[in-house]
Amino acid sequence: MNENRDNHVMIVTGANSGLGLATTIELAKTGASVVMLCRDQTRGERALQQVRSTVENDQIYLMLADLADLDSVAAFSRQFHDRFERLDVLVNNAGVFMQNRGETKQGLEMQFGVNHVGHFLLTLLLSDLLAKTDDSRVVVVSSGAHKAGRIYYEDLQLKNKYNMVRGYAQSKLANILFALKLAEYFEDKNTAVNCCHPGPVATNLGIDRITGFGKLIVGLLKPFFITPEKGAKTQVALALTDLGSKNEAAYYYKMKKTEPGKMAKSREDAEKLWQISITLTKDYLPEAILSQQAL
Ligand SMILES: NC(=O)c1ccc[n+]([C@@H]2O[C@H](COP(=O)([O-])OP(=O)(O)OC[C@H]3O[C@@H](n4cnc5c(N)ncnc54)[C@H](OP(=O)(O)O)[C@@H]3O)[C@@H](O)[C@H]2O)c1
């Protein structure tokens, strides 16, 4: 897996913590340029130093973007286009699991907004680079929790009856439905799209970064969870090896293609969610993409 790819360019979202950090270290070992998309400068710089002190690669970069703010996602895409001409791997890894209902800058429920919509916009804005790079890949980090979810079309932003499991499961189901449609969007363009479930992993997921709420419970569960290095194996393999499927988005767990839940296979829902997501991000999408969509 450590074959030299020093002309390749890769992005990992949520690269400063847990699975994202473990994934960044593995991708960096290939010699590729790896962009760590992080939302916080201090946490990002700390992680950047950790990667640099672990791997010999002078092409690891920190670029800031807040996936809870579509203006910030669009700014990231502009800066990335200014610096790079290709994109070999995009690992859509960042995620939140929120005890209390929150909203993104544009007023979306936080888990739906960050885990799905922010990544939806990011991926579409980078799709020109992915499409023109041979054998490029998008890896969507979902979760087995998608099986507990449905898309609440009647209350997508969960303004009524919010609870963290509903919100998280909806967003993780949205990840797989997005991948299903994205693979079609890229058909014949040499970009593979696949999703995975990392398993129960000891990370900072569910811990409030400001109050520290959730630290105790996550700490208590740690002995029963696997390490980020082990949990990241499938997403790393989908990014770097031939594990993933080519023109259909498949779902992987423990390095094996696995059946996702029934709702995650619905092409009708994938189409419906795609159209909703286009509508939510249309102010940020270029005409070239909007003109292909039946709005
Ligand atoms: N851990 C598990 O057991 C498990 C199981 C199934 C699936 N997953 C999935 O694995 C992925 C990675 O999670 P993890 O477990 O590694 O959790 P983590 O340690 O909490 O890492 C999450 C990462 O996402 C970043 N992030 C959160 N909100 C963001 C935003 N608005 N903009 C940009 N980045 C943002 C975080 O940045 P900050 O550190 O700055 O907040 C952090 O780098 C998630 O998609 C999660 O759903 C995890």
Image (spheres, rainbow, N blue to C red):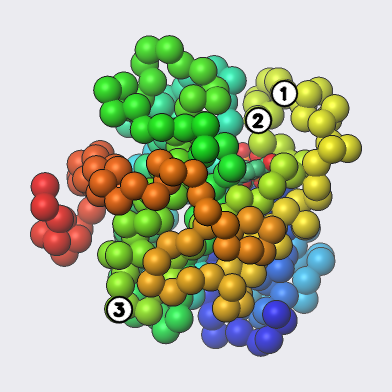
Residue lying furthest right: 223
Q: CA distance from mark 1 to mark 3?
A: 44 Å
Q: Which mark is residue 287?
A: none
Q: Which residue is mark 2?
A: 206
Sequence-wise first label, 3 or 2:
3
Q: Is residue 85 positioned above or below 22 on the image?
A: below
Q: Which residue is mark 1?
A: 214
Image point 39% across, 50% down: which residue? 265
Determine crowd level at label 2: few under 14, some 14-19, many 20+ residues with C-alpha closer than 10 A.
Answer: some
Q: Which residue is mark 3?
A: 188
Pick whichever, 127 or 200, lies toward us: 200
- For label 2, the SS is loop
- For label 3, the SS is loop
Sequence-wise first label, 1 or 3:
3
Q: Is mark 1 within 8 Å of ligand 1?
A: no
Give the left or right position of residue 261, taking residue 19 as reference. left
For marks 1 and 3, give the one nearer the viewer.
Answer: 3
Pick whichever, 215 or 162, lies toward us: 162
Q: Is mark 2 within 8 Å of ligand 1?
A: yes
Question: Which picture quadrant has residue 222?
Answer: top right
Determine crowd level at label 3: few under 14, some 14-19, many 20+ residues with C-alpha closer than 10 A.
Answer: few
Image point 61% across, 84% down: which residue? 5
Pinpoint residue 99: horizontal percent, then vertical percent.
59, 20
Is residue 224 visible in the rendered image? The answer is yes
For the residue marked with disc 1, what is the amino acid?
Gly
Q: Is residue 3 positioned above or below 279 on the image?
A: below
Sequence-wise first label, 1 or 2:
2
Image point 63% across, 56% down: which residue? 253
Pinpoint residue 217: horizontal percent, then vertical percent.
78, 24
For the residue marked with disc 2, what is the amino acid?
Gly
Residue lying furthest top: 161
